[in-house]
Image (spheres, rainbow, N blue to C red):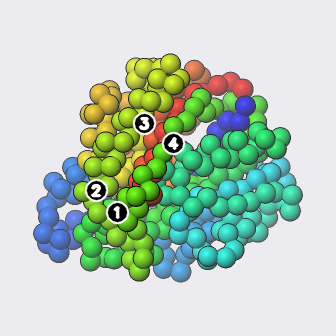
Amino acid sequence: MVAITHVGTYLPEKKVSNLEFLEKFETDESFIRNKIGVVSRARKEKEEKASDLCIKAYENLNSKTQIQVADIECCVVVTQNPDFNIPHTSAIVHGAIGLPETCACFDISLGCSGYVYGLSVISAFMQANGMSKGLLFTADPYSDIIDENDKNTALIFGDGATVTLLEQNQPGLVPLGFDFGSKGKGYKNLINEEKLFMNGRAVFNFTAATVPISVNKLLDKLDLTKEDIDRWYLHQGSKYIVDTISNRLGLDQEKVVFDMYEYGNTVSSSIPLLLSKDIETIKTGQKIGLSGFGVGLSWASMVLQKMNS
């Protein structure tokens, strides 16, 4: 079985405070804290690209568990803000951290649902090809595409990156099942042409209606109940959407993890950022629920269980 064993992260030290924009956007602190849930946004340096953020996340991972690069057999990067259209960002990461020439590498172009999709893809890829160790990166530097005068997006998104180490036959978090879906007819509600545009109401309505159905469908498929799940990691789109999904599902609020106040919505990195803080405290046998949703419009839910091997 392929298991998640460690998660490395990177958040830029530079922060932009949303409290400085209350007058500009004609809002108040309560809206910032209780609706958006983002007090400050993490901001990369202007010249930094997705691969730079990935490399810093890898350095953090390497500080947690010494990685033998020669043992890595696949490298996958989830991003919709790549360094270049050509080549794939995973090739740049591959070269920068010195992965072996025998290591497969490719990108996955997905946003908010990308981490869950990515876990399914890399797990299946490793199993099908008899691979023992793989790296799944996430990096979506939205500061490159945000219109700082657009209230719908400027106050929400932050920069960050993560890397998840997956290993065969090691203690860790093992996927039990997935649920996926798309409503492609709504793709224009969250789109980057010259700058990022988001129809906030349409994206909220899509998410609030779709995610609870996805989660319940997955639980039924796995013959589990909400009470069987020890923690929930929902994509950190905003505090309001996380609260709405939690309430519609009737989840125990103490089990729902929320933490984006100091860095913002980091798109594909939001779930693994949460997971990185808790992974060492998840006990053998415990189950956790994940759901990513947004750009596409797409969604992906999964359940993981901590196993000894």
Residue contact at pointers 3 and 1, CB within 8 angstroms: no
| Mark 4 or mark 3, earlier in chain | 4
In the image, taking residue 266 as reference, residue 135 lies left or right, namely right
User: Label 1 sits on what residue type?
Assistant: Asn
Q: Is residue 294 above or below residue 302?
A: below
Residue 119 in the image, given as x and y percentages of width and height: 61, 44
The residue lying at 32 percent from left, 55 percent from top is: 203
Residue 223 x %, y %: 50, 19
Observer able to see residue 69:
no
Task: Quickly name the residue at label 4.
Answer: 180
Which residue carries the number 1 mark?
A: 189
Q: Residues within 10 Å of mark 3 (few under 14, many from 20)?
A: many
Q: What residue would you read off at disc 2?
A: 202
Q: Which residue is mark 3?
A: 214
Q: CA distance from mark 4 to mark 1?
A: 19 Å
**What amino acid does circle 2 point to?**
Ala
Going from the N terminus, do you reach mark 3 or mark 1 first?
1
Residue at mark 4 to residue at mark 2: CA–CA distance: 20 Å
